[in-house]
Amino acid sequence: MYDKSQLMKGTLEGCILQILSETVTYGYEIVTTLTEFGFEDVKEGSIYLLLVRLEKKGMISSELRPSPLGPKRKYYSLTSEGEAYLQEFIKCWTEVQSSVNRILKKEE
């Protein structure tokens, strides 16, 4: 059986950056957005690990903000480095998607 998780690893970073390019938000909301778009198999813990990695790389930044439901939440936003990386990801994704679609559909 095909291991979908291997395909997802690189893809999720780009998806998270895209979400953050549209809004400043916190981890659970990112997980919810990904789930709404069909990433039901993604574990919440995996997303938090990706957020830590993206922040260490300088792609995103975070700040604690008050929460209406208890302790402060860590909100994430895209940095200029993250925006540049996202644009590169979109370009590469489009090229790979096109190539794979041509192969799978036997298009020229």
Image: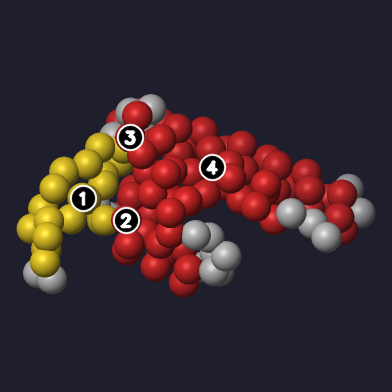
Q: Where is residue 62 in the image (x, y as percent from the top left)?
A: 22, 41
Secondary structure beneath dot 3 equals helix
Residue at the disc numbered 4: 90
Mark 4 or mark 2, whichever is nearer to me: 2
Left or right, 49 with respect to 28, comes to: right
Q: Using a 10 Å C-alpha cutoff, classify the residue at mark 1 as few (fewer than 14 neighbours), some (14 to 19) or many (20 or more).
A: some
Residue at the disc numbered 3: 55
Amino acid type of the residue that numbered disc 3 sits on in the rendered structure: Glu
Q: Where is residue 76 in the image (x, y as percent from the top left)?
A: 26, 47
Distance in Å between CA atoms under marks 1 and 4:
26 Å
Left or right, 1 with respect to 53, comes to: right
Distance in Å between CA atoms under marks 4 and 3:
19 Å
Pointers 1 and 2 in contact (C-beta within 8 Å): yes
Amino acid type of the residue that numbered disc 1 sits on in the rendered structure: Lys
Q: Nearer the viewer, residue 96 or 50?
A: 50
Is tag 1's residue or tag 2's residue first in the polypeptide sequence?
A: 2
